[in-house]
Image (cartoon, rainbow, N blue to C red):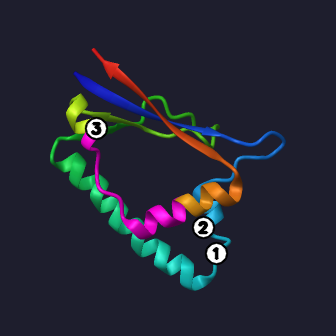
Amino acid sequence: MAVAHRFNYSVPEGQKFIRFEDWVSTLSADEQAEFRAAKQRQEDYRQASIDSGDMIRDFSSVDPNDPTSQPVYVWRDEETARKGKPFDPIWKDYWNRYLAETGIEFDIIETEIK
């Protein structure tokens, strides 16, 4: 049975959502260059999962007026979803720093697709 991963962002009360890309633009030029290289590796991992048939990205519910709206990752089955895909460690460090510095909480909501 396929498994969907929806991304959910919670913004601290009284604070506006800051997109990851906007936060990255505030970093030094060296950090931005390091991030861009890590982001490319991260996107390559995602594409490898797509190319192997492990997952697809479903854009059907993306709301262009909602900056927190993201495509859904649909994994072919529960085992593949549990395994997931690799993460570039440098990308992950920037992601964790973004969450910590903005106070944004990020969760993955998992549902089975019948």
| Relative side of 24 to 59, left or right | right
- Foreground of the two, 96 or 57: 96
Q: Which residues are magenta?
A: 82-95
Q: Earlier in the sequence, mark 2 or mark 3?
A: 2
Quadrant of the image containing the N terminus: top left
Name the amino acid type tagged 3: Arg
Q: Are marks 3 and 1 in contact (CB under 8 Å)?
A: no
Which residue is at 27% across, 54% downward? 47
Q: Give the SS element for disc 3.
A: helix
Label number found at residue 27 = 1
Q: CA distance from mark 3 to mark 1?
A: 33 Å
Residue 92: image quadrant is bottom left
Q: Give the SS element for disc 1.
A: loop
Which residue is at 53% across, 66% downward? 94
Badge 3 crowding class, 10 Å Cα cut-off, few under 14, some 14 to 19, many 20 or more, is few
Q: Which residue is mark 2?
A: 24
Label number found at residue 82 = 3
